[in-house]
Image: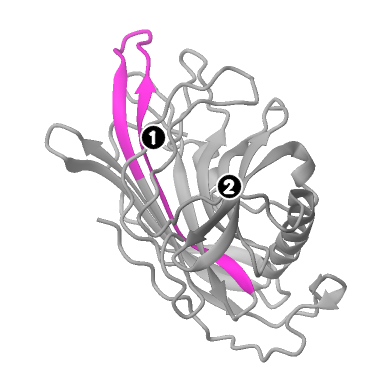
Amino acid sequence: MSGLVSCFLPAGGMAARGVAAARRGAGLLPAAIACGLLLVPLGGLAQVSYTPMPLDSGFGKLDLTPPAMPPQQIIDKFTEKESAFRVAMANYTYERSVRVDTVDDDTKKVDGEYYQVTDISADPDGKLYEHVVEAPQSSLERVMMSPADFQDIEHRLPFVLTKEDVGQYDLTYVGKQSIDDVDCYAFDVKPKVIEKNQRYFQGRIWVDAKDFQIVVTNGKNVPDDVRKGHEDLSPPFITFRQQVDGKYWFPVYTKGEGVLHFPAGHGYGSQEVHMREVVKYSKYKRFGTSVKITFDGQEVGKDTPDSGNTKPTAPEKPH
């Protein structure tokens, strides 16, 4: 179901654009995040140039010492857990809010905004559907939303790297790093090959060294469409997850920000558009299901009481 935004395309004079913090109550809460700057992608190559979102003070020093566990074993364990998480997430309802702003860099004020709140609910048969509960008229004028934007928000900003999908990527172990007392393994991720009409994640992920699940994602969805007259661009982003029901790390907060560069075309000049987007995920609640979720050969949560009303701690608002 559509109804969100994230990429941008130029149309005539208009351009279109395609948890760092403490583990308090088993959650990572994002602190202040500054702006990242998007650069032009390198055609169809698997490597894309961009400036990632900066990290806040919650990220400790990177330990380059080889891990006690071989990196491939870490990858095998966390991608298996991510596969279980993908199944689990299909059994949770939640609320998602999306705010996309254009910013006037002369006045430092927002000059256009898209905002939408959506409930992801379940029907009596357990099938998830989306219901828009708040959607004021968009005031975006310098950009418009593209189908890739909606798909990014729904599927790619909350990046999940499963054992089924990991073969599409090259993963490089970077080191061990603490994120506000949460010990994590850091990996750089990039697509091996960019296939036509497919989009991928490129950037860095942090995997909880205890739970073997992604807790922070910092990077960009690639590739952008840079064909003249068809530009569809998106900014880099950072996504924080938080533990829900004591079992899985769910996305709770995404911030993307960057300056998108649109070249001149027929009848319009070049533009640089400062974009900012914030996506919040909240009110997670598990609904009844007969699906069995397993990890390492054991059923997840079988001996753990299901606190269906558990809500993640609200992330701090960035400054």
Q: Identify the residue at image location x=30%, y=62%.
A: 317
Q: Amino acid at mark 1?
A: Met
| Residue 90 sits in quarter | bottom right
Secondary structure mostly taken by the magenta-highlighted segment of the chain: strand
Disc number for residue 315: none
Residue 5 shows in the view: no
Residue furthest to the top = 266
Q: CA distance from mark 2 to mark 1?
A: 43 Å
| Callout 2 secondary element | loop
- Locate residue 255 relative to residue 153 in the image: left or right: left
Q: Earlier in the sequence, mark 2 or mark 1?
A: 2
- Disc 2 target residue: 64
- Disc 1 target residue: 144
Q: Amino acid at mark 2?
A: Leu
Q: Is residue 45 magenta?
A: no
Q: Identify the residue at image location x=51%, y=77%.
A: 26
Q: Is residue 251 magenta?
A: yes
Residue furthest to the left = 107
Q: Nearer the viewer, mark 2 or mark 1?
A: 2
| Callout 1 secondary element | loop
- Marks 2/1 in contact by CB < 8 Å: the verdict is no
278 over 233 or under it: above or below: below
Q: Identify the residue at image location x=70%, y=70%.
A: 88
Question: Dividing the image into 4 quarters, which one contains the C terminus?
Answer: bottom left
Crowding at mark 1 (Cα within 10 Å: few <14, some 14-19, many 20+): many
Magenta extent: 248-276
246 over 62 or under it: above or below: below
